[in-house]
Amino acid sequence: MSRSSWLERIWPLVPVVAALLFVVFLLLGFGAEPGTALSAIIDGAFGSTDKVLSVTAFWIPLLLASIGLMVTFTAGLWNIGIEGQLAMGAIGASAVALNVNAPPYILIPLEILAAMAAGALWAAIGGVLKTRGKVHEIFSGLALTNLAIILTNYLISGPWQPPEGGSFRGTAPFQDAALFPRLLESRFSPLTLILTLIALAVVAVMLSNTFWGLKLKALGKNPKSAFLLGVSSERETIYAMMFCGALAGLGGAVRVLSWFDSLRQSISGGIGFLALLVVMLAAYRLLWVPFIAFFFSAVLNGSITLQLRTQLHSSLGGILTGVLVLFVLLFGEYKKLGFRREPPETPAEVSHE
Amino acid sequence: MTSKKTWLILSLLMITALLLAACGTPAPAVEEPVAEEPAAEEPAAEEPAEEESMEEEMEEEEPMEEMAEGFTFGIVLVGPRNDRGWSQAHAEGAEYVAANMEGAEAIIFESLNPADKPEATLEGVVDEMVAQGAQMVITTSDEFEEDTVGVAEKYPDVTFISISGDDAWADGQDAGKAPANLGNIMGRMPDMKAIAGCAAALATENGNIGYLGPLINFETRRLAASAYLGAQYCYENYAGGDPAALQFTVTWIGFWFNIPGVTLDPTEVSNNFFDTGADVIMSGIDTTEGIDVAGQRFDAGEAVWSVPYDFEAACDSKPEICLGVPYFNWGPAYLDTAMEVAGGTWTQSWQWIPPYWPDLTDNSQTPVGWINGPALTAEMQANLDTFIAGLADGSINVWEGPIVLQDGTEYIAEGAAASESETWYLPQLLDGMDGPSE
């Protein structure tokens, strides 16, 4: 291994260490013991089976959204609207759960389909607005996210409010048959893990080994020449958005059918935005995404314990992950610093820069 | 393979984090139970065994340890602990216990709601509180009511208090839902709202009062109706007005506070009240828009008043127009409950605690309070005092029939008094109030 390649390998750790140091100084500034704080976070994330399952259960929708974002990022799209797509997926799944009576083996696939369709449709609106209306996906995404949240609030305080009257908390709990089967009374459903792994595999193969993946990459790198070479930027843009929306929608279904048992206000609560950070921190490499997403989930879950043990504000976990992303972006231009040998792009590695 | 190296880097990443955490810990400096450290540091192979031992030790050691050392309790807030409203009142209640009970220690968890903390659940928070030795956990929102039943079943040895709930009420609609270790506490706010309504009726010059409502449920209907009944009584008996001519409009904004784009904007609603002829705004929401807007109108030369809500010091933002404030004071009830739980004498109950009538501002006694506002004239004050005295000795009961619902059906017959459950589960607003009932 050459020296430069060793440096390149180790480089991603620099922003991580920098971020940790930053947080340590922050803690010292608050007069808190960094060791106690970090061990509280770790214990809060992995201290018991329940906790590990909770971290895993929160990880799943985050990972689904992140995998979806890999597709849109590859196509050069900033799918900020993913938060709304998650919420729409949750609404789609809830619509089925509340209105259809069927055994689980029919109900659950129906819910999944409805969630993915709802997410994909919501994303398609953003895609069409971009290609036909020349509205940048960031702006339409923010608007559509707000609309999805307003729609959620309308549904839970209006047509879908529980019989005892709206408390704005959410709908009444769904019928048992509608819920994903959960492990050990936790919020984690192994079924969702299987679906997520399938999604991961499909996207990995698609991005690296299919013609469509190649088209998306071309689109992402240079839409104009991609168009000249015969890639229909309009169609691929909309498809990429819909693909991402479908996965985010599935994430929304996981939120209502396994994390909760009903549609709640702020059902996504920022998971979509978190996924954007995950993908950026992973430097748009699909292989890293599951680990980074898991790390985020662990830190956030651990922060609950942190707040309870130290009475420090639990947004510290959010600060750590945010700072991490910030530092990665700051240090992220390492390729321009000249360490990088130029290897031929290995097909196994899905990279988008 | 590149993927192999990726794995390597990631494991390095995790190890660095773990090491940093471990190195920083000089010794179990704080009161944490001994068993907690190892599980965090050794991933993979040894985990199951470690966990078991940890759980065992926690089960065996902690309760004894805590019993000997003091009393730990947890309190879960739906909003930030410094919101100058509902959540702050609870946080201060918890601090009151910690200050007035020897060895008592409060674990406060704030902002448990899916918008602020999508990763947190009541169960997860309670797990942690119990692991830290909490013998009592107070959940302070309507939103937690259902989940509290779940955690109470999970931890039968811990006492749970669900604020504003009715699961433990034998005569309630959810009777039988609560396990034996779950109780409910609520302050009797309707009485204070009646006083607030009375103050509004005494001040109004054109007989037109606006009520800024949050969302619609049993509690908010009950409070708005109570305010109306108090206003009606005082308008007729002290101000000499025709109670049928008293205009009382309720506008529900849709939530406890303003969420742009989701709820109605309370500032706009307040302005609208004044524009359509009201000269007093009563607030039923968590935030201060009502008094803020009234203050601006006052500064512009209009004769208007306001009655804020929830927080003891709410008049401070515009004393000149403030008629008074009904507020919650959880400390005494929390302290009593904590003492009972610690002493082993607590039994399940649903408590709707009446105010301490001799002094509605005595925060060592009363669960709900009323503070007179600077805008009350001497005459208004005298009438209001008469009204409060009447409520206190029972000679006045605004919840006495005839009470007619908004749709015209008789709810409480002439001469009868509404029972607790009739007041609690008020199905509609009352005849004479303008505004939607559901």
Image (cartoon, coloured by chain):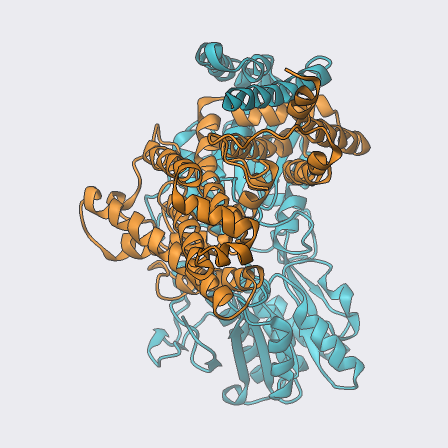
Chain colours: A orange, B cyan
Q: Is residue B385 visible to us here?
A: no
Q: Is residue B4 visible to us here?
A: yes
**Which residue appears at 36% of the width and 57% of the height?**
A118
In what quadrant of the picture does the C terminus of chain A appear?
top right
B371 shown above or below A71: below
**Which residue appears at 61% of the width and 71% of the height?**
B266
B361 shown above or below B35: below
Which of the two residues, B25 or A249, is positioned nearer the viewer here? A249
**Which residue appears at 63% of the width and 52% of the height?**
B366
Which of the two residues, B235 or B15, is positioned nearer the viewer here? B15
B82 shown above or below B124: below
**Position of residue B230 measured from the top left corner of the image (x, y, whole percent):** 55, 73
Which of the two residues, A243 or A158, is positioned nearer the viewer here? A243
Q: How many numbered tags mark residues here?
A: 0
- List the single residue furthest toward the front: A229
**Position of residue A313 measured from the top left corner of the image (x, y, whole percent):** 68, 39
**Position of residue B94 measured from the top left corner of the image (x, y, whole percent):** 64, 40
**Position of residue B13 measured from the top left corner of the image (x, y, whole percent):** 62, 23
Which of the two residues, A113 or B299, is positioned nearer the viewer here? A113
* Left or right of residue A117: residue A147: right
In what quadrant of the picture does the N terminus of chain A appear?
top right
